[in-house]
Image: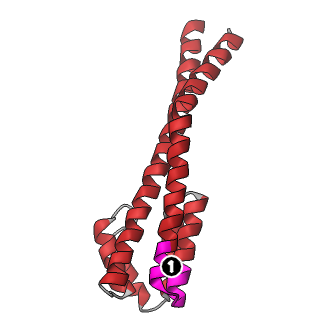
Amino acid sequence: MHLTGALLVILAGGWTGLSAARELHRNTHLVGELLRVTERMYTEICRRRRPLPEVMGVLEEEFPVLFPRDGAFREQLREEPFGALWQRRVRTMALLPAADGILRRLGTDLASGADPERTLSAAQHDLEVLQGALSAREKESSRLYVALGFSVGCLTAILLI
Protein backbone atom coordinates (compact mmCIF):
# COMPACT_ATOMS: atom_id res chain seq x y z
CA MET A 1 0.00 0.00 0.00
CA HIS A 2 2.84 2.40 0.88
CA LEU A 3 4.65 1.62 -2.35
CA THR A 4 1.51 2.27 -4.38
CA GLY A 5 1.02 5.59 -2.62
CA ALA A 6 4.67 6.50 -3.14
CA LEU A 7 4.44 5.64 -6.83
CA LEU A 8 1.33 7.77 -7.19
CA VAL A 9 3.06 10.72 -5.48
CA ILE A 10 6.05 10.36 -7.82
CA LEU A 11 3.77 10.20 -10.84
CA ALA A 12 1.83 13.24 -9.62
CA GLY A 13 5.07 15.21 -9.32
CA GLY A 14 6.12 14.13 -12.80
CA TRP A 15 2.71 15.04 -14.19
CA THR A 16 2.98 18.49 -12.64
CA GLY A 17 6.37 19.01 -14.30
CA LEU A 18 5.04 17.79 -17.65
CA SER A 19 2.04 20.10 -17.34
CA ALA A 20 4.29 23.10 -16.69
CA ALA A 21 6.45 22.24 -19.72
CA ARG A 22 3.35 21.76 -21.88
CA GLU A 23 1.93 25.11 -20.76
CA LEU A 24 5.18 26.83 -21.69
CA HIS A 25 5.07 25.19 -25.14
CA ARG A 26 1.43 26.19 -25.57
CA ASN A 27 2.23 29.82 -24.75
CA THR A 28 5.11 29.85 -27.26
CA HIS A 29 2.86 28.38 -29.95
CA LEU A 30 0.06 30.83 -29.14
CA VAL A 31 2.36 33.83 -29.50
CA GLY A 32 3.45 32.41 -32.86
CA GLU A 33 -0.19 32.26 -33.92
CA LEU A 34 -0.70 35.86 -32.78
CA LEU A 35 2.28 36.84 -34.88
CA ARG A 36 0.63 35.20 -37.89
CA VAL A 37 -2.57 37.10 -37.06
CA THR A 38 -0.77 40.45 -37.09
CA GLU A 39 0.99 39.57 -40.34
CA ARG A 40 -2.36 38.74 -41.91
CA MET A 41 -3.87 41.96 -40.56
CA TYR A 42 -0.96 43.90 -42.05
CA THR A 43 -1.58 42.31 -45.45
CA GLU A 44 -5.32 42.97 -45.36
CA ILE A 45 -5.22 46.51 -43.94
CA CYS A 46 -2.03 47.98 -45.43
CA ARG A 47 -1.74 46.15 -48.73
CA ARG A 48 -5.30 45.36 -49.70
CA ARG A 49 -6.81 48.42 -47.95
CA ARG A 50 -9.69 46.48 -46.44
CA PRO A 51 -11.80 48.02 -43.68
CA LEU A 52 -11.63 46.56 -40.17
CA PRO A 53 -14.96 44.65 -40.34
CA GLU A 54 -13.78 42.77 -43.44
CA VAL A 55 -10.43 42.09 -41.82
CA MET A 56 -12.21 40.57 -38.82
CA GLY A 57 -14.12 38.31 -41.21
CA VAL A 58 -10.83 37.10 -42.70
CA LEU A 59 -9.40 36.49 -39.21
CA GLU A 60 -12.50 34.53 -38.19
CA GLU A 61 -12.06 32.29 -41.24
CA GLU A 62 -8.32 31.72 -40.93
CA PHE A 63 -7.91 31.64 -37.14
CA PRO A 64 -11.11 30.08 -35.73
CA VAL A 65 -9.45 29.12 -32.44
CA LEU A 66 -8.54 32.73 -31.62
CA PHE A 67 -11.46 34.38 -33.38
CA PRO A 68 -14.52 32.11 -33.14
CA ARG A 69 -16.68 32.46 -36.18
CA ASP A 70 -20.00 33.49 -34.79
CA GLY A 71 -20.71 36.38 -37.13
CA ALA A 72 -21.63 38.46 -34.11
CA PHE A 73 -18.58 40.70 -34.43
CA ARG A 74 -19.76 42.29 -37.65
CA GLU A 75 -23.26 42.74 -36.26
CA GLN A 76 -21.96 44.23 -33.02
CA LEU A 77 -19.67 46.57 -34.95
CA ARG A 78 -22.74 48.45 -36.12
CA GLU A 79 -23.70 49.14 -32.50
CA GLU A 80 -20.33 49.43 -30.72
CA PRO A 81 -16.96 50.88 -31.74
CA PHE A 82 -14.21 48.58 -33.00
CA GLY A 83 -11.93 49.30 -30.01
CA ALA A 84 -14.43 48.08 -27.42
CA LEU A 85 -15.21 44.93 -29.38
CA TRP A 86 -11.53 44.18 -29.93
CA GLN A 87 -10.80 44.58 -26.20
CA ARG A 88 -13.61 42.17 -25.33
CA ARG A 89 -12.42 39.64 -27.93
CA VAL A 90 -8.84 39.80 -26.63
CA ARG A 91 -10.07 39.37 -23.04
CA THR A 92 -11.76 36.07 -23.99
CA MET A 93 -8.52 34.67 -25.46
CA ALA A 94 -6.90 34.20 -22.01
CA LEU A 95 -3.41 35.21 -23.16
CA LEU A 96 -0.19 35.81 -21.31
CA PRO A 97 -0.21 39.30 -19.77
CA ALA A 98 2.50 40.52 -22.18
CA ALA A 99 0.68 39.25 -25.28
CA ASP A 100 -2.62 40.55 -23.93
CA GLY A 101 -1.12 44.03 -23.53
CA ILE A 102 0.30 43.99 -27.06
CA LEU A 103 -3.04 43.04 -28.61
CA ARG A 104 -5.00 45.51 -26.49
CA ARG A 105 -2.65 48.32 -27.53
CA LEU A 106 -2.98 47.21 -31.17
CA GLY A 107 -6.78 47.40 -31.02
CA THR A 108 -6.74 50.77 -29.27
CA ASP A 109 -4.33 52.24 -31.80
CA LEU A 110 -6.23 50.88 -34.81
CA ALA A 111 -9.52 52.16 -33.40
CA SER A 112 -8.06 55.63 -32.76
CA GLY A 113 -7.04 56.02 -36.39
CA ALA A 114 -3.29 55.76 -35.86
CA ASP A 115 -1.13 54.79 -38.82
CA PRO A 116 -1.98 51.08 -39.28
CA GLU A 117 1.34 50.25 -40.90
CA ARG A 118 3.34 51.62 -37.98
CA THR A 119 0.94 50.17 -35.40
CA LEU A 120 0.97 46.68 -36.90
CA SER A 121 4.74 46.74 -37.39
CA ALA A 122 5.24 47.67 -33.73
CA ALA A 123 2.88 44.88 -32.61
CA GLN A 124 4.70 42.36 -34.82
CA HIS A 125 8.04 43.44 -33.41
CA ASP A 126 6.80 43.16 -29.82
CA LEU A 127 5.33 39.70 -30.52
CA GLU A 128 8.58 38.55 -32.17
CA VAL A 129 10.56 39.63 -29.12
CA LEU A 130 8.09 37.87 -26.81
CA GLN A 131 8.17 34.71 -28.93
CA GLY A 132 11.98 34.71 -28.87
CA ALA A 133 12.02 35.06 -25.10
CA LEU A 134 9.45 32.29 -24.69
CA SER A 135 11.32 29.99 -27.09
CA ALA A 136 14.56 30.49 -25.20
CA ARG A 137 12.80 29.88 -21.91
CA GLU A 138 11.14 26.77 -23.32
CA LYS A 139 14.49 25.34 -24.48
CA GLU A 140 16.09 26.03 -21.12
CA SER A 141 13.25 25.08 -18.81
CA SER A 142 11.19 22.27 -20.35
CA ARG A 143 13.44 19.44 -19.23
CA LEU A 144 14.10 21.17 -15.95
CA TYR A 145 10.37 21.33 -15.15
CA VAL A 146 9.94 17.61 -15.81
CA ALA A 147 13.04 16.70 -13.80
CA LEU A 148 11.99 18.93 -10.90
CA GLY A 149 8.50 17.45 -10.93
CA PHE A 150 9.80 13.89 -10.67
CA SER A 151 12.44 14.89 -8.11
CA VAL A 152 9.93 16.60 -5.86
CA GLY A 153 7.63 13.60 -6.24
CA CYS A 154 10.45 11.25 -5.19
CA LEU A 155 11.43 13.41 -2.23
CA THR A 156 7.83 13.67 -1.10
CA ALA A 157 7.38 9.91 -1.43
CA ILE A 158 10.52 9.30 0.66
CA LEU A 159 9.27 11.70 3.33
CA LEU A 160 5.89 10.00 3.44
CA ILE A 161 7.32 6.51 3.76
Q: Position of residue 5 (x, y in %)?
A: 58, 14
* Number of other residues with Cα within 10 Å of mark 1, as a class: few under 14, some 14 to 19, many 20 or more: some
Residue at 50% x, 32% y: name it.
18
Q: Is residue 55 left or right of 114 when viewed as pictured?
A: left
Tell me the quarter of the image containing the C terminus: top right
Disc 1 element: helix
Find residue 72 and report its image quarter: bottom left
Find residue 73 and report its image quarter: bottom left
Residue at 47% x, 39% y: name it.
22
Picture layout, residue 72 above or below residue 114 = above
Q: Position of residue 31 (x, y in %)?
A: 47, 57
Can the viewer see residue 1?
no
Magenta region's main secondary structure?
A: helix
Q: Position of residue 120 (x, y in %)?
A: 46, 75
Q: Magenta includes 105? A: no
Can the viewer see residue 125?
yes
Picture layout, residue 66 above or below residue 121 = above
- Mark 1: amino acid: Thr
Picture layout, residue 94 above or below residue 143 = below
Q: Position of residue 104 (x, y in %)?
A: 56, 73
Picture layout, residue 78 above or below residue 8 = below
Q: Is residue 70 left or right of 76 when viewed as pictured?
A: left
In magenta, the rendered stretch is 107-121
Residue at 42% x, 56% y: name it.
32
Label 1, on which residue? Answer: 119
Residue at 46% x, 91% y: name it.
79
Tell me the quarter of the image containing the N terminus: top right
